[in-house]
Amino acid sequence: MKSKGNIIFCIAFSIYLTTMIFTASMFGNMQVFSLVLKLARCGAYALLLWKIVMENQYSSGQIVRYGIGAAGVLIVYYYSKYTWVVFLLLFLIACADVCFQDILRTYLWTNGIGIAIVAMSSVWELIPARNSITEERQRYAIGFDYVTTGANYWMYWVLAYICFRRKKITLVEGAILEGVTWIFYVLTDTKNAFAITTLAIMSALFLKIWNGRFGKGLFIFLIKNMTLIGTGLMGELVYLYDKSEFVSKNVNELLTNRLSLSYKGVQNYGIHLFGQAIEWVGGTVYYDTEADFGSYNYVDSSYIQILLSYGIIFLIVLLIGYRLLGKKIVERQEWYLGLVIVLSAAHSMFDPQLLWLQYDVFILCLGYLFITDKGQADTVFI
């Protein structure tokens, strides 16, 4: 039987996910609906606080870790003014004693239904369309606020499904998932999400027959270090941008100008210890007839955006957290979780969802690092 705290967390998480997926759709542009979503999200945060306060079995070690984490987050918030970092810590603390399978189940049901409602509302023309159609490229937003949003939601849903099903996933399931992935690709032309999702499905099916030896050393290395590798590669490309014509032209073109925007972001805002307040202007500027297109400054790379927004200290702590998480995954031989962590980290080199809980549910696994009791950790970590 599920504990009361477990149920409260899953309800709060489901409410949060619901508000975020509808906010990212054209429903979120309706003023009254937008207000309702904000109020519901505040209710989710209140439930998380209630759950945290209601718990009375924190060890002294946990309290110390929570205190250090809270102090660090408040410093980052003071400099960056981004409230999400505070709410993310709230989720990490609240989820520390919740079984990750229950979290995945909540995520899959909530976001799965949400994606379907938004997509069908667009098909039935219940909400307006924000499509991008030119002579060179036809991209359909499928009810979301931008053409890539739906494909990225689907990609992370597939990663969560693979992690949830693990060895139980079948060839038929893989074929169905790939079929839907292809539909998203044809409609949205989101290449990164399509490549990662297809690779995830193929890799998950391969793990079913894996002998546990072929390529194990490389797999373990990637599980422990993929976020560090992603950060290093993006940092090196940004550094070489004005020094190598191959990087500034060929690589930047391959990455659809993402590298140029990362380079300009570092040049314009600089790197700070604890971050800074930056008003990111993204793709929705193209739908505003009164907007200045020259104001577009969005940095898509998660690692570069985190570095600029939250600071180098926060990024280092995050990388250490993923390194420790990777070690736990390898120790427990949770290869499917390791697979999705590697792929989401690779995707984050060129897309901004690494810290966005509505997409990347796996970041909640960092909450288990707060647990000092190994026995308790074993009962909730997959």
Image (tube, grey):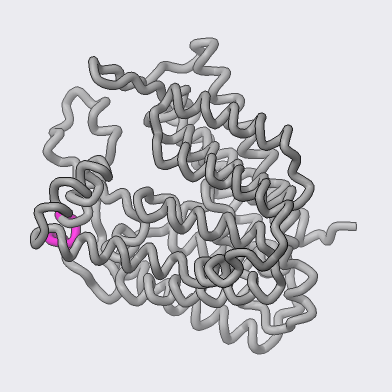
The stretch drawn in magenta includes residue 267: yes
Q: Residue furthest top?
A: 124
Residue placed at 22% from the left, 51% from the top?
259
Residue placed at 53% from the left, 52% from the top?
360
Left or right: 15, with 244 as reference point? right
Picture quarter containing residue 262? bottom left
Q: Position of residue 27 (x, y in %)?
A: 48, 26
Picture quarter containing residue 271? bottom left
Q: Position of residue 152 (x, y in %)?
A: 47, 39
Residue placed at 38% from the left, 75% from the top?
316
Left or right: 335, with 380 as reference point? left
Considering only vertical position in the picture, is 202 above or below 212?
Answer: above
User: Can residue 93 be seen here?
Assistant: yes
User: Can residue 32 be seen here?
Assistant: no
Q: Residue furthest front?
A: 214
Q: Which residues are magenta?
A: 264-269
Q: Position of residue 141 (x, y in %)?
A: 41, 25
- Is the N terminus in the top left, top right, bottom left or bottom right quadrant? bottom right
Q: Residue furthest bottom?
A: 60
Left or right: 2, with 260 as reference point? right
Q: Considering depth in this image, is 171 or 361 the residue closer to the camera?
A: 171
Considering only vertical position in the picture, is 249 above or below 288?
Answer: below
